[in-house]
Amino acid sequence: MTTCTFPRKEFEAQLGKKITKEIEEKISLFGTPLESLSSDSLEIEVFPNRPDLISFQGYIRGFKAFLEISPGLKKYSLKKPEKNYNVKVSPSVKDIRPYTICAIVKDLKFDDEKIKEIIDLQEKLHITLGRNRKKVAIGIYPLEKISLPIRYIALEPEKIKFIPLESDKEMTGNQILSKHPTGRDYAHLLEDYDKYPIFIDSKNKILSMPPIINSRDTGKITHETKEVFIECSGFSLEVLQKTLNIIVTTLADIGGTIYQMTLDYGNKKITTPNLTPEKMKLSLANTNKLLGLDLKESDLQKLLPKMGYEYKNKTVSIPAWRTDILHEVDIIEDIAIAYGYDNFTPEVPNISTTGEESQESKIKSKLAEILIGLGLIEISTYHLIKQNEAELFKLSDEKKIELEDSKTEYKILRPNLLIPSLRILSENKDHEYPQNTFEIGTVFSLNEKQETGIKETENLIILCSPGNFTKMKQVLNYLTQQLGINYTLEESSHSQLIEGRTAQIKINNKEVGYLGELHPETLRAWGLKMPVAVLEIELEEVFELLKK
Amino acid sequence: MAEIQKIIESLSPLERKIIPHLNLSLKEIKQQTNLDSTSLLRALRFLENKNLIKIKLTKKKIIELGTNGIYYKKNHLPERQLLILLESRKVTPLEEAKKLSKLSDNEFKVSLGVLKSKALIELKNGKIFLAASKAELSKKTFEELLLEVLPIEEFKLQPEQQFALENLKKRKNIIEIQERSTVSFTVTELGKQVSGEKIDQELIEEVTPILIKNWKKNKKFRSYDIKSEVPKIYGGKKHFVNQAIEKGKRIWLDLGFKEMTSTITQTSFWNFDALFTAQDHPVRDMHDTFFIKNIEGALPEKKLVKAVKQAHEQGISGSRGWQYPWSEEETEKPVLRTHTTCLSAQTLASLDIKKDLPAKFFAIGKCFRNETVDWSHGFEFNQSEGIVVSREVNFRHLLGYLKEFYKKMGFEQIIFTPAYFPYTEPSVEINAFHQEKQQWLELGGAGIFRPEVTSPLLGEPIPVLAWGPGFDRLMMMTYKIKDLRQVYENDLKDLRGKEVMVG
């Protein structure tokens, strides 16, 4: 989600109306939640499917259509390429960053506000459509500093030499990636290649090294800039075209004139930007079926222009800056938005099916009911444990299932319920005793037979503090008696329990868990002052027996 | 008179025991009655409740020696120990002083600080220079003098003792300040009257099996003070999160939905790819999703994998797809499920569309995201998932089910706004009106699964209404919890005291 801040005065001037309660609602119903509104600005959210609404101009274009101030497909004129308006793409970039799409825009007038807007749009497109410059990188250059035509080629890093932005020293490609702050941030996008791509002009001046940084000499847009050269580089011609279209239409909306350029790919030449709308057939029947409405052709002719489309002969013309229309359903959603989500009458259909709780849920509920009857309090803990807790427990490496790059200290999937329960007891050590708790929850272990390589089992843990072996055995007796299950105990040992007071619990001759008294060393390690008796069992066998 | 008689009848055995001695001091009463301090205090409280006496509490602070203080009083304060060492040498390198003094790191540091502040030494170039005169050396410091007079009541401290106390308080366990309260009481007018009366010792205290057996008429019971406080008791109970989940479950069951279950760990295939989430979508970044280290998952049957690949690469059922090379390796990576929607995908894949339709399923379960923890975020959260599979369902039905569910959860005012998810179209955001905050709150998303999702999973693009709004925010609103962390902290006092969910 992208947050966009627009100046309120300018916004109201463009609409020709004040922002009333009704307009506020319309903004959210247009599919751009209004986050905040103050006397000088408004902040909206743009979903990732509509990068064409990120710029102020793009948003106004869409919203004016929605309010039916200027509905329909907005048209832009394109000037044919002039002499030398071409970019030659060398085969050397093919395996590195194969495509570029370019344009020139003239008759521009920049002030501080406009410069900020364009840089902001470029940055937001880099993050969203560009996936942090991986998929698309955008360069915008003052045309007067460049000599056309331009070449897009790849060179060995040490042969690339220019002064990058925010520096005053000439650097090589390698130096930029290792020493320049922006270079370091994006180094991962290039460092595996032998050659790095560059844009270079007819006087052999390097304009930039995409997707990393521009040259300081060809630099930045200023108040004096009237004409710009724009390039987008990346891996998919289509995504690049859409990105370029979003930028050039935004520039045209602030008064620019768009000029096409010829891209010479050796075996083929293409002319960009291309603003020809794509066409898609739309079925009225499908629309009504999916939305549950009874629209007529005439309704579509009214609703589609509200979303910036043109609709003729059952065919929708899609604006060339829309990136999100993959299927008819995408257009149908826009019809729903134009119709107004607030105008739909919700209805619960008469679909007769029988509700059914899962067997395991039912059994777990029953277990909880019995334990609550004994006065135990249910706790509900995190599925993750901390690194130091695993160490306290002396958890062996083969039992540790770790997460990549967790942002908190919780980094490991819990292998049992005892660790989280000990944490809870220790956090509650100054509260009133007795503390008798239980939890039913999922624990994790490695197992190659599972789809994810991890086996998940439901466990039950009961802790009584203060408590001893006898008390816990009483609980187990009561629980199994109530469920009609037989169990046996066998002498056993457990790293956290007192030897000679530890039992292995068996059901159907299968080992399902343990019962015993926590060793004082464990209690001390967790900062506990009261004795604790514990039992933990895997419920798989219990489920099996009770399902029968 | 009747009032006094009534009071007398309500006196507990403890009270009766001390009433004849109310003219004595507390210490004397204790001796006379042989009661322990706690019982005595309790009896006094009872009497005060009956307005027979007035209790006066006086608090006193007493300054005592702490564990280190006791030791230092015997063996000198560390600064004195250091001073004694320095006395014979004038200039001593720090290291050497440290070693010879045998003080701990902390004691040595503190001692240097203290002596410097008293201008008894100077530190230069890692050496200690003695700056104190003979007279100064032989004089006891305020701190030493204070230690000698302890214990002492705080109000008796002289200014220089107060100064020394402040200094010593900053150091570990030298000083302990004990708060002691002393109890005394005065007898009220009513109390004097009562204590003058003859107290009938024959009142019955307890109903016992023997009493029942030998019951005779006209015996009198002591009457209770029915308003007096009784000790608290607590029962066992379900965790409040699970109570809320059960309520949610019951609503879906009543509406004819069947429960889905699955694992918390899932391959990226089910969590993302089967739900048409492109492999370069930002949600698939380690920054947002918990990936599991060093494990590779396995894929489901080939036919399904092929169809999903096609949906992503070139599209399926009239779609253009995302137009990129889809990687099988990427899809094998296990994750902690980021939404319960992966359960819906698995359920759809298991349906036989010839026999099983129409079908309605739900799940309320834990989901995970790689987040830091604050008042409104956490790395675990609950989601309420549901799907309706039928050739006859549409967008209005989706809104209908959602409205019904939230109404039953207690939210009458719901509005729907457009939203975006890679796997639904149309998509919708559910907003509920928060009465207290007087504003709309986002509860989560829903939509109709895209053909790119349903076609591979069901074999053809049959409409599937789907929703997966978060459950925790609802729960916070219901229980009036302001900080999400409270939902997961298991504070037993809080769990015991929290009201149960009714309805």
Image (cartoon, rainbow, N blue to C red):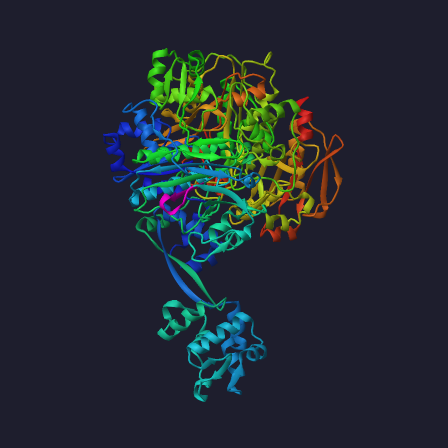
Above or below — where is B429 with respect to A469? above
Q: Position of residue B174 (x, y in %)?
A: 49, 69
Q: Is residue B97 visible?
A: yes
Q: Which of A497 and A52 is in front in this view?
A: A52
The tally of labels here is 0
Asked whether residue A139 is drawn in magenta, I would say: yes
Pick the front one: B145 or B445: B445
Residue B36 drawn above or below residue A536: below
Residue B272 figure quarter: top right
Foreground pick, B53 / A290:
A290
- The percent coordinates of residue B292 (x first, y second) are 61, 40
Residue sticking out furthest to the front? A83
Q: What stretch is highlighted in magenta?
A: A138-148
Q: In this view, does B502 lie to the left or right of B329?
A: left
Name the quarter where the C terminus of chain A is drawn: top right
Q: Which quadrant holds residue B478?
A: top left
Does the magenta-highlighted stretch encompass residue B238?
Answer: no
Residue B34 in view here: no
Where does the image place residue B370, in percent across and percent down from the top left? Answer: 52, 41
Of the pair A10 and B340, the residue shown nearer to us: A10
The quadrant of the image that shows the N terminus of chain A is top left
Q: Position of residue A500 (x, y in %)?
A: 74, 47
Judge left or right: residue B178 versus residue B314. Answer: left
Residue A27 location, quadrant: top left
Q: In this view, does A402 lie above or below A539?
A: below
